[in-house]
Image (cartoon, rainbow, N blue to C red):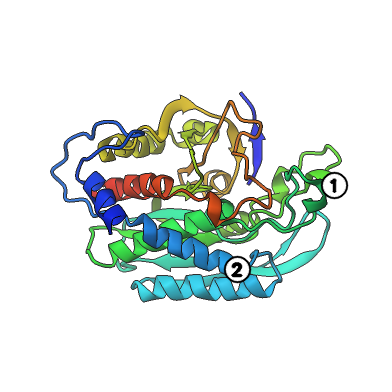
């Protein structure tokens, strides 16, 4: 993304919050009779670190290939059926790169399915960095990329311990962050230069019977708040309502603001508009910040030091609440 249109002690404490304990940024949890597993933010953070240890996952790099193998191995380790969707992606300047989406399915025999997705590539240019000398430097992509994948891998681990009445498909989109850099933008509408992996997937979905999809983008940032993204509200409001309700039930409505944020070109749009599957975006929005996506967006500071376990926990636990009460 991104193109914003404006208008053990710790583990114990985290597990306690799954049972209704609240921290300062939470609201009282609504009562539920369903036994919801506890999301382990430490595990998600470890996955984010592992991805970043490979280096920026830009298409064509050794880091990209090594990290793709790691992601597939992790989903396989937790019982998912993993397939690859190979494609050639042509970026804004006409250069083409081979890449692939990673698709990991739990309980592939189940007819009813929901999809959780994120992108796994890194932006090749830190074009929002305060230091112009970094504008041609790849982004570490701890939050903008690895965080969504880390949350999904932890969800896959938890789901491997249960049998649900439906399947969950985890899709890692490639080539999301190759959109036109600001230093080469000629003022044209460049929205189609983003989200290349999800555009390809939307034309070639691995399953056309998916009930709905939830996109995770930058779900580990410090101090993040997730507003109702504009296109999500417009195209799949009933799914936004479901997720925001789950956040209240899980006790994390302090992270999920019920007001509408910006309209964002992201991977959920091809899913909605091309595949015709209702899809929403969980993405941070900071109306009072210099950059609406946070200070590390598309900078060299998007590293693991700026990842928050509290944010990871809020998002992961909300998704578990949704899944187990679905």
90 in relation to 67, above or below: above
Q: Foreground residue, 47 or 212?
A: 47
Label 1: few (<14), some (14–19) or many (≥20) C-alpha neighbours in 10 Å? few
Q: Residue at x 57, y 64 (%)?
A: 52
First reached walking from the N terminus: tag 1 or tag 2: 2
Q: Nearer the viewer, mark 1 or mark 2?
A: 1
Residue at the spot 78% in from the left edge and 46% down from the top edge: 131
> Which image quadrant for residue 287?
top right
Q: Which residue is mark 1?
A: 184
Which sits in the foreground, 117 or 225? 225
- Please tell me in which quadrant of the rendered image residue 141 appears: bottom right
Q: In the orientation shown, which residue stands out farthest toward the front?
A: 9
x, y percentage for residue 60? 71, 71
Residue 121, can we see it? Answer: yes
Q: From the viewer's side, name the closer residue of 115 and 25.
A: 25
Residue 303: image quadrant is bottom right
x and y percent of residue 293 in the render?
Answer: 59, 38
* Label 2 secondary element: strand
* Circle 2 residue: 100
Determine if residue 83 is in view: no
| 43 relative to 282 in the view: left or right | left
Q: Vertically, is 94 above or below 234?
A: below
Query: Element type at marker 1?
Result: helix
- Tell me the distance, in whole angstroms, between the alpha carbons under discs 1 and 2: 26 Å
Vertical position of residue 74 compared to residue 296: above or below: below
Task: Please tell me which residue is depicted at 16% across the width and 36% down the height of the picture.
Answer: 31
Q: Residue 247: x, y in percent?
A: 33, 38
Mark 2 surroundings: few (<14), some (14-19) or many (≥20) residues within 10 A: many
Question: What is the count of numbered marks?
Answer: 2
Image position, residue 23 (x, y; %): 30, 37
Residue located at (64% from left, 50% from top): 301
């Amino acid at each position: 993304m991104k193109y914003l249109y404006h208008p053990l002690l710790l583990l114990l404490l985290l597990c306690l919050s799954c049972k209704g304990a609240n921290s300062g940024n939470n609201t009282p949890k609504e009562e539920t009779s369903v036994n919801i597993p506890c999301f382990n933010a430490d595990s998600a953070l470890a996955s984010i670190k592992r991805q970043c240890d490979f280096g920026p996952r830009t298409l064509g790099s050794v880091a990209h290939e090594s990290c793709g193998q790691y992601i597939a191995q992790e989903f396989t380790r937790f019982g998912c059926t993993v397939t690859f969707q190979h494609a050639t992606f042509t970026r804004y300047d006409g250069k083409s790169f081979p890449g692939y989406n990673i698709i990991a399915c739990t309980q592939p025999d189940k007819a009813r399915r929901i999809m959780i997705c994120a992108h796994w590539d890194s932006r090749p240019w830190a074009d929002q960095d305060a230091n112009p000398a970094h504008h041609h430097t790849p982004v570490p992509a701890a939050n903008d990329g690895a965080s969504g994948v880390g949350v999904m891998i932890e969800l896959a681990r938890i789901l491997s311990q249960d049998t649900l009445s439906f399947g969950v498909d985890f899709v890692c989109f490639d080539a999301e962050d190759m959109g036109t850099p600001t230093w080469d933008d000629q003022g044209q509408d460049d929205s189609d230069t983003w989200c290349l992996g999800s555009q390809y997937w939307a034309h070639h979905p691995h399953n056309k019977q998916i009930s709905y999809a939830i996109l995770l983008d930058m779900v580990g940032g410090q101090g993040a708040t997730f507003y109702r993204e504009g296109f999500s509200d417009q195209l799949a409001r009933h799914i936004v309502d479901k997720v925001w309700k789950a956040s209240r039930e899980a006790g994390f409505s302090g992270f999920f603001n019920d007001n509408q944020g910006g309209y964002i070109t992201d991977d959920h749009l091809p899913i909605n508009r091309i595949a015709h599957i209702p899809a929403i975006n969980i993405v941070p929005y900071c109306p009072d910040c210099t950059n609406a996506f946070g200070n590390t967006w598309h900078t060299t500071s998007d590293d693991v030091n700026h990842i928050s376990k509290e944010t990871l926990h809020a998002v992961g636990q909300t998704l578990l609440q949704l899944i187990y009460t679905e």
